[in-house]
Image (cartoon, coloured by chain):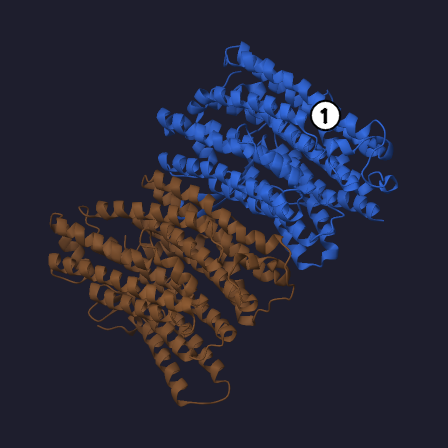
Amino acid sequence: MFSVMVTILTPLTAAFFFFHSPAQGPNHLPVLTTFIFIPILAAFVTLLFSEKYTRWINLIFSAAQLGIAFKVFLLYQTAVGGFQFTEELPWINGLGIHYALGVDGISVPMMILIASVYLAGILVSWNLSLRKKEFAIFFSLMVAGAAGAYLSLDLFFFFLFYELDILPMYLLIGIWGSGRKEYAAMKLSLYLLVGSAFLLIGFLAMVFTSSIHTFDIRILGDLAQTGFSPQFQHTWFPLLAVGFGILLALFPFHTWSPDGYASAPTAASMMNAGVLKTLGGYGLLRIALPALQGGAKEWLPFFAILAVINLLYASLVALKQKDIKYVVAYSSVAHCGYLVLGICAFQITGLNGSVVQMFSQGILTAFAFGLVGLIENRTNTRQWDQLGGLAALTPVIGGLFMAATMANVGLPGFSSFVAEFMVFLGSYQSGFHGGFTIFKILFPLAATTIVVGAIYYLRMIQNVFFGPVKVPVDQESIKDGTFIEILPLVLLLALSLLVGLYPKPWVDMINSSVEPLIDHIGGFR
Amino acid sequence: MNQIGAFLPELLLIGTAIFVLLVELFFDFENKKNAINGLAFLGVLGSLFSLPCLGNFCCSSSCSLGPLPVQAFNGFLKTDELALFFKTIILLATLYTLLASFRYFESHNIRHRSEFLAILLFSAAGASSLTSAQEIITLYVSLETLSISSFLLAAFMKKDRASNEAGMKYLLLGVFSSALLLFGFSYLYGLTGTTVIAEIGKSLSAQPVSSIEVFAVILVVAGLAFKISLAPFHMWTPDVYEGAPTPVTAYLSIASKSAGFAAFVRLFWVGLSAPSIAPIWIGLFSILAALSMILGNLEALPQTNIKRLLGYSSIAQAGYLSVGFMVGGQLGITALLFYLFVYLFANMGVFLTATIVSSKIGSEQIVDYAGLWKRSPFLGVVLMVGLLSLAGLPPFAGFVGKWYLFSAAISKGYIWLVVIGVIFSVVSLYYYLQVVRRALFLEPKDVSPIEIGPYEKLALGVSVVVIILLGFWPTVMLQAAQSAASSLF
């Protein structure tokens, strides 16, 4: 009954908003503001209505958001490029702060990522029983924060929306989490706040050192050559990069993330690991690179080394884990290494690959966390040694887990293949064709982690899904995934395959914004 | 020319206070308690509405009380936009304090209510006139009206040892600091031959800086820093905050502190802003601000009593506020005023919640806040919003306040101060979250719901709405703060 309603309602709402939602033009509602405020509205409506309707309300709102995301994706004019759908309102006059939103080829795919993870998160928590109203409210607010941060063109709003996420995340982990949840929640919040402390100071220093005193990201980016002295760039780029690195869980600032993800409820892990973490990379690319390009050129090889250490270290640690959620968590930390590596290559293919990786990593990490949630739900454990032969009991989940393994390893056909291939190509070219020489060493080191990734995922699947059946609970009680449980995962997988099998429209769109960026910062071709 | 607008708010407060005392003395009727409460409340409300209005803000410029600035007593009292802003904060804080006191009266069965209310109103009158004082004797008299009433309020629970200790400590140190302040004032008078702040400013900028002048400035800083509990003059704060009745603690932490800042702004940015002397006290304040942010936040970490915790937190907040004050200029004072306005609602929300909760559970320990969300979800939300706004987390207004404050500081080149401020904001989040964690995560031992009266609900609701609204849309309030700051710069 429910499954039929969900199947009908979701595409219908999405389609309705796809066709009827506001688009550009003076007589329409601003589409990006609508995109950000849909989850906030969802939170309000949830608050007003009875708990019975909570999940339906959120389902409708998230489907609507997905519809709008696809609409923007199709309406974005790749040939024109640059920021489109822009909105601007003066906000705080004394400081020159504007409410400015806009999307370019880099952020449009992220809109689809956010909306689909939102929908998936709502479906994954469909059968939640504890304080579900509050859960939906906090989760929606978290989505709103993420959406706002990706679409903001003003440092103040970027920061505000980003920090808007910390409180819901703290509460989601602390109340609905598992294991050492209070410790993990506090650790995550404090780490992220330290990261944003770096950013806050860096942003303010940038704004008040420049002659214009504006918080507009576009103007600050254009200032680069004239606005900031080499000395300033040399000092402040690494501070900003460390700030973004903490958000991204870059080695050695990564320790908050595995603990946080392992303790968080499934939907929160999906949102955090999939969408929020990549915000670090996005900020690096959107704010730090264009504005402080001189400093970037000096410091990026150093951060490339950190990225490769991150890759190797997280992969090796993942090998040692016995808890499947920790394996997925460390694997997501490792995958962020590719993202940073691509940016640090300072080269067009690598940068394109990084952006694809942001999207792909988000989708696939959310997918993997969703699967772990299903297994934990059924067996009440996440430990390898207590599990075995699950494929016989739950063939569908087993099949999806196989897909997750293949995607994680980066087999052709999945989005991860496109992303990782481009990142490696970029770092190869940076090392061998007039870019940073250090990549001659880093490139092969990074490539080995693909093998390590295959090992830990295959070992996990072998232990959990194959061999003699072993579960800590009654075997009869274990059922395969229901329709509603499987639906969000299939949706995410389909997105990954869509990008993996036909990457052209996505890569073209991303490239339309990366190319001007590379020209602007004087990157390698 | 005397314009009644310049002292009407104070007149109303004092009149109400005397009336409350007379009613208590000469009348006896049913519901007298409620009548007295209502009388005091109406008095403060009337005083709030009698504030001369900004021509562009609430009503047209053809206001019956005349446009700003209004002045009286040869200009010794002058209400400009700045004074108006401070008065609004002080009177709003007094309103919240009254609400909390009504609850406190019931739970602690206090007999001498009218005295308490009258003293509170006298104190508010002192604080209010302090903000418009243009002359150091007037300023000092107002300050003493505020302080002496506060000593009495802190020690109001006669039978309670902690309250007596609080009152005594506050009295001794308070009188000592007043003496220092007066000593400093006497030097300033000796140097310039005038007690009018603006004249002092003119006279001092005409003469070279002398060691006596520096000494006088240090004395004044020390005397006033006590009132706003800046480190290292903060030792009294946690003890007094813990021992005093909770509504009084709330009053001290907001109204008294705002009045102190009003005195600081007026005295230093008008009277001592000469380029020769300004760098000395600005340097002094940057050290005091940094110390307060560091000590206040660090010492708050191990606290187990909610009032002590808030005491240390208010020391830290005084540090943040002083950053805005010492940066000065349009940006700095705007930041100070906006931050103070947000601080008012955040702190009052938390203190009112604390009063309600402890009147029910009879404990001020943070561990006893466990499971508040189950006993009263509304109070849980208020507590979370208030505390996290103090910590400066979005989407609450404290975030905008801190952003503005740090922007102002960085624009004048105080990066080191901003670094300290930001780092210790992170530290502060830890102890604020400890309270939030208990209130929202844990299961209660006793699940009986906590009742909230309609007025309290309204007041708490207003504070939450204001904090969230200003977090997203601070524009109008910042404009008001800007126009207030522009009456000095």
Between A422 and B476, which is closer to the camera in this rendering?
A422
Amino acid bearing label 1: Tyr
The answer to whether residue A83 is seen in the rendering is: no
Question: Which residue, given by chain and number where applicable, does mark 1 sit on?
Answer: A457
Judge whether A399 appears above or below A479 on screen: above
Q: Quadrant of residue B410?
A: top left
Identify the residue shown where x is 68% and y is 22%.
A453
Kindly identify which chain the residue marked by label 1 belongs to. Answer: A
Judge whether B296 appears above or below A187 on screen: below
Q: Residue furthest front?
A: B161
Q: Quadrant of residue A355?
A: top right
Left/right placement of residue A409 relative to residue A469 reads left
How many numbered tags mark residues here? Answer: 1
**Can you say which quadrant of the picture contains the N terminus of chain B?**
bottom left
The tint of chain B in the picture is: brown
Between B128 and B85, which is closer to the camera in this rendering?
B128
Q: Residue furthest right?
A: A476
Identify the residue shown where x is 61% and y is 29%.
A333
Q: Residues within 10 Å of mark 1 (few under 14, many from 20)?
A: many
Between A409 and B252, which is closer to the camera in this rendering?
B252
